[in-house]
Image (tube, rainbow, N blue to C red):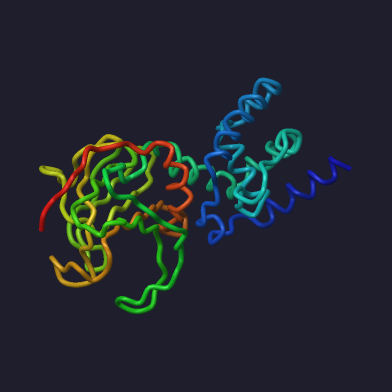
Amino acid sequence: MELIQTKCLVNNMIENGINYDSFREMRLSEDTLEKVKKKMKRILNKNPFLQRLPEMDEFSLLTFSMMANSFDLVNKPLVDDKTFCRGIGKVCATPSYQELYDYYKAILSNIVYFPVPEVAEATIYYDNSWYNLRTYGGNRRHEGTDLMASNNIRGYFPVISITDGVVEKKGWLEQGGYRIGIRSEAGCYFYYAHLFSYAPELEEGDKVIAGQLLGFMGDSGYGEEGTIGQFDVHLHMGIYINSKIGEISVNPYWIMRILERNRTSYEEHRTSD
């Protein structure tokens, strides 16, 4: 019976391929990622033959489990060891699996720090606003996570790089205001928008390290360059990958939740208007 169930599951995974909308929601948790690492280590110790398969690491188990659980590992568990061992040989040879494996590795392999350090006398709060309606410039969907400043003071909270990488974009966007984009070593693009100011001497092409100051949180955007005050002070955090269907955004909310364990602490920063 277990063999039949595994065969049916694997066939469904291969037949269904990638649901990009579900994939983009990135339903993961810190607890799940820790379980993935421990479980994969145990599986490889017990089944050394699996090491002959390509790219057999925690991203392999994560990809397989996501495909098996409708891309939701917040509400659903990882696949069990037997199911993974019985099914991975067939699934890992499919284009859908190989594509997803690359995406998860690009997004998750370089993340280190929460983008807003702790600062005295104020806090940051955020919720899962993924794909909520936005109307500035016409109806569109919110493709990011807004990290809100409880004191609503521009220039108060520093913004740091989540990853090592390279400054790919810097400057004004009508919707994003003063923004900076960092391309990680694994190829993921991290987008920090609505800044009040930039870190000194930081230019496109510069290398940055995880935890490096990028600028300060603000409320810039929604107009010509220099426009402020159109909304509350916050950091819009976006995450993008180059996919086979073009550049696509993924939900940063669950990534932010995972990174909270690595939130740094800064001395109080205040910048006047």
Horizontal placement of 206 versus 148: left or right? left
- Residue 266 x %, y %: 25, 38
Near-viewer residue (8 or 109): 109
- Residue 133 x %, y %: 42, 73
Q: Is residue 253 above or below residue 34?
A: below
Quadrant the C terminus occupies: bottom left
Find the residue positioned furthest to the front.
121
Residue in the image at 75% along x and 38% along y: 83
Near-viewer residue (54 or 58): 58
Quadrant the N terminus occupies: top right
Horizontal placement of 261 versus 88: left or right? left
| Rendering quarter of residue 40 | top right
Find the residue positioned furthest to the bottom.
138
Horizontal placement of 163 versus 52: left or right? left
| Rendering quarter of residue 132 | bottom left
Q: Is residue 110 above or below residue 47?
A: below
- Residue 56 x %, y %: 58, 31
Find the residue positioned furthest to the right.
1
Q: Is residue 131 above or below residue 171?
A: below
